Amino acid sequence: MTNLSDLSTAMADAVELAARSLVTVRAARPVSGTVVGDGLVLTPAHLLHAEEVPVVTPNGQTRTGVVVGRDPGSDLALLRVDDLNVPALTAGEAGRAGELLLAVGRPPGGVQASLGLNPGRVRDGWLHAGAQPFPGVSGGALVNAQGELVGVLNAGVRRGQLLAVPAARAARVADLLSREGRVPRGYLGLATQPVHFPAAATPDEVDEDAFPGGPFGGGRFGAGRPRGEGGPWGGRRGPGRGPDHGGHGHTGRGGMDEARLEKLRRFRERFAGGRVGLTVVQVEAGSPGQAAGFRVGDVLLALDGEGFTHPAELLSRVRTRAGETVTLRVLRGGEEQDVTVSVGER
């Protein structure tokens, strides 16, 4: 069994290894940046208010970082820095739930780290670091005990929580931004509305009146708008936007804002113990959803084995998977079946 002294040394070595690939980005407020390629740095997009920004290397030299592109979905921006001469951080695996993780940043005062535990799952495209945030940690690296990159950190997505874009997703974002300057947004072309299956009922026994419009009111197909991938009646962003555009105003960086998260939390408490599906109320012509054979009245139960509690979760999880093939569990004609669909790009 590893003693505490050996564990402490291993953690310090992991921090030191990660720190070699971290820079300081002097954005709207100083944050960290993780080097992911030759002269390529990932850092939070929401703090970059200009197309060029000073970048300070581990040995104290200042270089100019040029914004190659931004991805609002992950709140990541890619900087290209000439003559950076800083090695890229090796990507690794988060490992099992409960394994130690380290949040490592390079704020202006020097390298800083905090210890966390692997939560064991990614939710809505984000990995909870399980570590204490500190000023300047955003853009830093969440690493495993070997000092390998598990995710790129962000303390500005959800108040009081330190989250990370998983390493595989961050690498894909960096690759797309470096080649195309943008990250395509995934969509299915389906407008959906929640339907609640009481805990004692099976999906084919659901009472359509048991869910009067979801957590935001309105009749099932009445006064309220269909929720989820936009709904055919738009939302606060204006009419005529169609599916995949959301119906409750703007989301926060890379996800739902605080008000929507609070509504979702109350929604989950209200229907704890039951099951929620997403009823398809519109299929966009020519969309990936139509190509896969979805039709009005289908009830979506899960995406790649993970269920839903609100249409916003479907939107969030599909948005980052443009070009990929996903599997949706569907209730159709009283029977459950799996339907594969290629996520479209916009």
Image (spheres, rainbow, N blue to C red):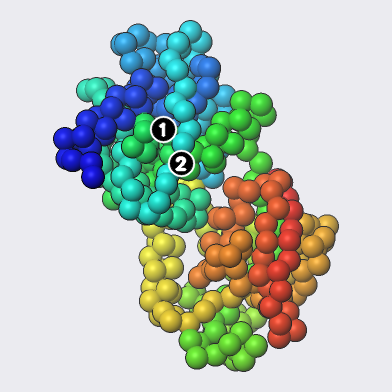
Q: Amino acid at mark 2?
A: Glu
Image coordinates of residue 304 in percent, x first then y, are 61, 61
| Mark with earlier residue (2, 1) | 2
Q: Mark 2 — residue? A: 93
Q: Residue, x 55% and y 65% (percent of image)? A: 306
Q: Which mark is residue 148?
A: 1
Location of residue 105 in the rendering, given as x and y in whole percent from the top left corner: 31, 30
In terms of secondary structure, where does tag 2 sit? loop
User: Residue at position x 28%, y 27% from top?
Assistant: 13
x and y, in percent, of residue 277 in the image: 59, 75
Horizontal arrangement in the rendering, residue 131 relative to residue 322 (left or right): left
Local packing at callout 2 (Cα closer than 10 Å; few below 14, some 14-19, many 20+) is some
| Residue 280 shows in the view | no
Residue found at the far front of this picture: 1
Q: Look at the numbered disc 1 and give the secondary structure of its residue.
A: loop
Q: Residue at x 29, y 24 (%)?
A: 16
Q: In which quadrant will I find the N terminus?
A: top left
Residue plotted at (46% across, 53% down): 122
Residue 289 found in image quarter: bottom right
State the residue in front, 24 or 26. 24
122 w.r.t. 209: above or below: above
Q: Which quadrant holds residue 266?
A: bottom left
